[in-house]
Amino acid sequence: MNTHTPRYPSLYEANARILLRRLARESGRRPTLDEIPDSWLARLAECGFSWVYLMGAWKTGEAGRRVSRSNEQWLAGYRGLLPDLREEDICGSPFAVTGYSLHPDLGEPEALPRFRERLHGEGLRLMLDFVPNHTAPDHPWVQEHPDYYIRDTDGNLAHGRDPYSGGWPDTLQLDYANPALAEAMAAEAQNIAGQCDGLRCDMAMLVLPEVFQQTWGREMEPFWPGAIGAVKEEHPAFLFMAEVYWDLEWTLQEQGFDYTYDKRLYDRLRNGTARPVREHFWADLEYQNNSVRFLENHDEDRAAAVFPPERHRAAAVLAFLCPGLRFFHRGQFAGRRRKTPVHLCREPEEPVDPAIEEFYQQLVACLRLPAFRDGEWRLLDCTPAWEGNPSHKGYIAFAWEREGERYIVAVNYAPDRGQCYVPLPWGDLTGKTIRLRDLIGQAAYDRDGEGLLSPGLFLDIPGWGRHVFEVAGE
């Protein structure tokens, strides 16, 4: 396997059950991990991905599936998505886990190490799920270790939940006030670490002591530092990624997580106002480097449904050409608009949006460039084009540099046309003619280097317009 890990890697999420169901329809064979074509893996590697997050690989049980197939509110949502819904389309949530071994529907146990080996052959690493907060109702621990679970005031086993929701009726809540449970879950993490290269930790903040106390009124010792430390002692290159909300990202980074979801950036991009997005990039670079940037995943609505087309492109340039881990979701490049609940193993048929597909091809080509993978990033100033013109406030601009390669990313993240100057940060441009070539458009300009330093690169682009300029001197 290629041992180089980019400073700013890209990750591709695929729902294992949906992916294999689609491959089975295309091939006419039983869907297993062995049926995933080498060509599919090779395409991901060619796109510059470092990670494949295979969501939903673990064993689930009949109890969780029964809840998924009987909850009337959920069923209404399924039918709205799949008018021809069949019972076999409802597989149950992959986060109602009964055991951390490969689900039989995905192949025999040995199929997982074979799949991982094939990924490694393409220079890709495998990320799988870890669900620390709860288990399925028919997990073996329910019978073998009932003290591992929380009970409600009536003595019934409590469903998993967070402090702000009514809970997940297809799960049971683990009791981290019991040190034996915490030890058992840390052992589970070590077990999984032998089967993959990284873990996406579901709702990781729920097992922080302060959140657990808020939710259940019970005290627990910190879990993550010891669990992560034990895994990394045995597997130093292993990666932990936290699904986290409520401004607890830095807390989890301090406790050992390599990456934490950046839901705040997503929300600010979705809101469509430039200033909060720009201010988001004022954060300490260490924090940003460890942030997971995304426009969609299995929990969020599809980006093509949330963002109008031009704003979608502008948001993608900002989200994926800034520092951090770039997280993409299967179907995002095709412009899919319909979100499939995790309880289902079939997705609706949708046509490819060729304009979105072409845009993402251009964006992914940028992400293959060494400067965007391993370079130095900085946020740039955007100054008024002339006195009394406030439209520069809609602009956000970055510079990237690595070993003489230089790029400028500039987006007018506003609905109206705007103008600004962007002073470039490289003093050695003086006395040179500088060629600016847009990697995601047709623009190409020759400019005097001194003028690019002051007053700067002049931009006059429409609302949601964007450029990714290669900066080359002559």
Image (cartoon, helix red, strand yellow):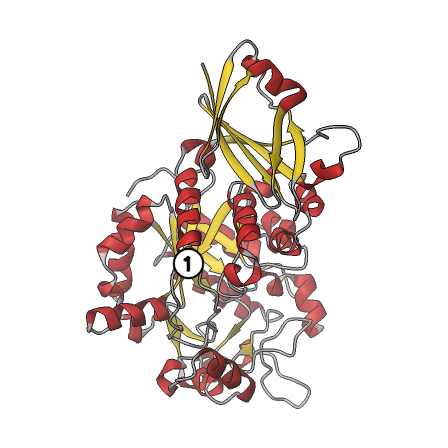
Residue beneath the point at 61% across and 74% down? 161
Q: Is residue 473 above or below residue 45?
A: above
Q: Position of residue 348 (x, y in %)?
A: 40, 73
Residue beneath the point at 29% across and 50% down? 43
> Label 1 is placed on what type of residue?
Asp
Q: Give the quadrant of the N terminus.
A: top left
Relative depth, front residue between 342 and 245: 342
Query: In the drawing, does residue 284 fall left or right of residue 100?
Result: right
Q: Position of residue 162 (x, y in %)?
A: 64, 71
Relative depth, front residue between 390 and 29: 390
Query: In the drawing, does residue 2 fall left or right of residue 326?
Result: left
Quadrant of residue 345 within the rendered picture: bottom left
In this view, the residue farthest toward the right is 388
In this view, the residue farthest toward the top is 431
Q: Give the quadrant of the C terminus.
A: top left
Q: Is residue 256 above or below residue 388?
A: below
SS assignment at label 1? loop
Residue beneath the point at 47% across and 40% down? 8
Q: Is residue 35 above or below residue 2?
A: below
Q: How many marks?
A: 1
Q: Is residue 369 above or below residue 457?
A: below
Mark 1: give few (<14), some (14-19) or many (20+) Cα within 10 Å.
some
Does residue 257 show up? no
Query: In the drawing, does residue 422 fall left or right of residue 187?
Result: right
* Residue pointed to by mark 1: 353
Q: Position of residue 133 (x, y in %)?
A: 55, 69
Residue beneath the point at 28% across and 53% down? 41
Q: Position of residue 169 (x, y in %)?
A: 55, 82
Does residue 171 show up? yes
Query: In the drawing, does residue 426 fall left or right of residue 437?
Result: right
Relative depth, front residue between 346 and 128: 346
